[in-house]
Amino acid sequence: MATNYKTPGVYIEEISKLPASIAPVETAIPAFIGRTEFAKDEDGNDIFPVAGTKLPTPIRITSFLDYQKYFGGANSETAVFETSGIPTITDTEDGGKIVKRVISCNAKKSEVSGKYMYYAIQMFYANGGGPCYIVSSGSYSTNITNDAAKAGLDAIAKVDEPTILVLTDKHNAFSSTKSGYKDVYDYALAQCARLQDRIAIFDAWVLSDSPYTDAGIVREDISMDYLKYGAAYYPWLQSTLSYAYSDSVVIKHQVNAGTGPYDGLTLAAIKAMDLNTYRTLVNEMDKNVIDLPPSSAVAGIMARVDNNRGVWKAPANESVNLVTGPSLKVTAQQQETLNIDPTTGKSINVIRFFTGKGTLVWGARTLAGNDNEWRYVSVRRFYNFVEESVKKATEFVVFEPNDANTWLRVKTMCENFLNQLWRQGALQGAKPDDAYFVRIGLGVTMTSLDILEGRMNVEIGMAAVRPAEFIILKFSHKLQE
């Protein structure tokens, strides 16, 4: 309605000719759920959850230093050295002088306590990660149960920004036949399907010498519902990160096959007596590196690919940083049954080592591996991105007149956004009409009853690019002419 001017003079009216625009949402904001040393908010208040009365509080961080500020350090894996990798000094003396000293310390990587959050965040940032959310399920003395993990998922469900869910810690019900996460996996996938703005990344939690065993356990622990919102990765990664431990580790000392003066002392006691020996022991202990589940590294790779190429690029054929290789070398033949499961369709993406190339993510499928629409992680994440961006941008239309003027504004806004994506290479097609369509209007997407009932229906179709998973080169002999 025009302004009713009553006083003589000159007036200025600004007329907007530009259509409303759609701002793209962030696409790689993971939420990590697991145990931490402590949990504090920006005011220094304790935010550890209390079962039945207090949900975890998600905290947004942007760096590993932020993590250490709010959640502390790693769990001390002192028990790893005390049970299987006892640091041992073996001295050979001649005339009271040491002529040879050998220090050994071989920790078993499978005996880590299962509290991986601290290491997971390091892997995330080493592989290109950025902003993320941390949800503490409790202190290191807390067991990860279904209730604790679900409480973390409930807490992060109330935050709109996260787009990836990662469960970092080993479940206390973990065994050689199950992950313990069965109910939680279904709970996470159901949340992703309900909110439609995130996916879940799962790990194969069994460390065995057989990829078939691990794959079978993961597939059994995930139901058939909402598979298009999840992805699983295998095997674990041999990281370059050393174990965290305290100076209470007890040392074994042998001299000429007898007991030495350091035998039975702790690192702290040796440090007070002989700093050089202490440093030599610590250097040897730090050579023991930890095996880690791959989900956090994959989350970092997704962030890296999104920033460099776009969410429509598959997070595969990408190098994994801060690792020496996968914990198990899977062959191309072994990957066949992991990548494609004709019975359930639950594809498992393999991380493999290639000579001259290093460690690469060599799979790009969701758990819905037999679904032609939602087979690829990049397609699922791209649709999440577009749906969330358009949803947020069109909120201004709520309670606007449901007429042709509003329909035109919405259609133009969506077409401009999709056109930009097409020009960036996110959509297939030689021209825009081949890449997308936006339909809205009476007799097109709405009936008179829809308008009477206050509904505005908008149909958007997109020809999303898909990864070239199988490259077939065909060669033949050409006869001389």
Image (cartoon, rainbow, N blue to C red):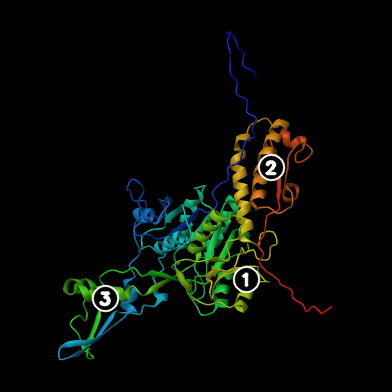
Amino acid of disc 3: Thr
- Judged from the image, the secondary structure of the residue bearing numbered disc 3 is helix
Placement of 274 over or under 374, stated as above or below: below
Outermost residue toward the left? 96
Q: Which residue is mark 1?
A: 339
Give the residue displayed 55% in from the left and 52% down from the top.
27
Where does the C terminus fall, quadrant-wise?
bottom right
Mark 3 or 1: the one toward you = 3
Residue that badge 3 annotates: 280
Residue 266 shows in the view = no
Residue 449, image quadrant: top right
Is residue 276 placed above or below 316 in the rendered structure? below
Residue 301 at x, y percent in the picture = 52, 61
Query: Which numbered disc covers residue 415?
Result: 2
- Left or right, 362 with respect to 122, comes to right
Inspect the image, locate mark 1, and give the three-letter code of the amino acid beneath it.
Answer: Asn
